Amino acid sequence: MKVGIIGGGAAGMAAAVTAAKCGADVVILEKNERVGKKLLATGNGKCNLSNLALSPDCYHSEDPACLKAVLSQMGVQDILDFFHGLGLMTKEKNGWLYPACEQASAVLDVLRFALERLGVGILTEQRAVRIERRDGRFLVHSQNGNGHSRHEFDKIILACGSKAGLSRESEENGITLAKQLGLKTEPFLPALVQLICRERFFKALAGVRVNAAVTLETKGGTIRETGELQLTDRGISGIPVFQLSRYASKALARGGELRAWLDFFPSLKEEEWEAQLLSRMRTLGTESAERFFTGTLHKKIIGVALKEGGISPSENIARLGREKALAVGRLCKRFPVTVTGTNPFSQAQVCAGGVRLDQLSARLEAGGQKGLYLAGELLDADGRCGGYNLHWAWTTGIIAGRAACEGEETDK
């Protein structure tokens, strides 16, 4: 059985290792100069492999039932067993799983070494541009610096990723190949990405990091996330923003702007924060507004909050009055910003969208396309920060690699 894998990323390598262990003759066609290039940047270079809190609720898809059916086939321990079998030692930090050495390069190395031991062919700088069926087999046409090549396989696994991390959108060809083969797709949108905001005051806030809650208002309701917020000269970033960004991308794609609210005191209820402000007024009521709020928040945030509240930093709190002082305080609990866009695909960690899951069997074979399997980011499934997206890549790669070596599929 000759199995061709289009894409040498996380899912493609997992599929190749699995298929080769099952006895298949496996060849990877990779468009880059080496396999696993994006893997090196995951988890800030530490490679967050998976998460002990794995749940379908940590993912999004237009076909949640299909997503759940795929995830149910492999748990966290299955992924750990896969990597332990390749020689990788792992560690856990607050439920997040990493290589013991905390180096993404080690994950890539054990995968590369396994591919070498198993005799997997790796053809780099080969961009697959067309796939056709011929006499029950697949003929893959690819381009490289020397022209065109043709490769014939009994079965193929599409694992060519999404637009995430690409500097030019035209580089992405997974959706094109899927459409050639008659598959329906959801448009790719940036996810796990920074949000761009309209307000000019962000230039004054650039570089600030603060624990905060971010609430995004969409037509579908409000979504709130808490964590370390990073303020940039163009808007908001950090894990809570990343967790919300796929909702923002979806809403922005429908047109218009979005309202978000920043809560710089997420652990305090509004009445608790107001009580603290009143207590401060009893002891610091003769100070200037700037001095009154000093020690509560980063001074850049205080400066912007006072300006947005129409208060001079030098104005005396007593002369200002209780209600105006409380109004600035309330602003710090519900600070409005206008989301106008996201950073580009090149800065997104993953994408929302992809090939619809309801066209695939539980073993990821395309309905009506015997011998065609799909895996990884190309599929319409995106997870939260915390190793969930790599878990999806390993899981779908292993399932597809195993299925491609097994007998006829009859389930849909």
Image (cartoon, rainbow, N blue to C red):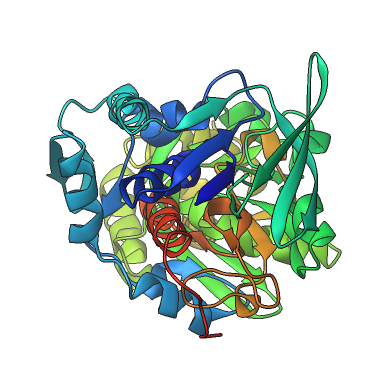
Task: Residue at 59%, 38% (x, y): give it.
Answer: 304
Q: Is residue 219 above or below residue 372?
A: below
Task: Residue at 44%, 53% (x, y): give it.
Answer: 397
Q: Is residue 169 left or right of residue 103?
A: right
Q: Position of residue 7 (x, y in %)?
A: 59, 39
- Which of these two is toward me, 86 or 185? 86
- Which of these two is toward me, 2 or 321? 2
Q: How many marks?
A: 0
Image quarter in which the C terminus is found: bottom right
Q: Position of residue 2 (x, y in %)?
A: 53, 47
- Which of these two is toward me, 323 or 20? 20
Q: Quadrant of residue 154?
A: bottom right
Task: Residue at 33%, 72% (x, y): give it.
Answer: 73
Farthest residue in the top direction?
146
- Which of these two is toward me, 335 or 193? 193
Task: Residue at 66%, 71% (x, y): give it.
Answer: 356
Q: Position of residue 74 (x, y in %)?
A: 30, 66
Q: Is residue 260 left or right of residue 122?
A: right
Q: Position of residue 22 (x, y in %)?
A: 33, 52
Farthest residue in the front direction?
135
Visible in this render: residue 299?
no
Visible in this render: residue 207?
yes
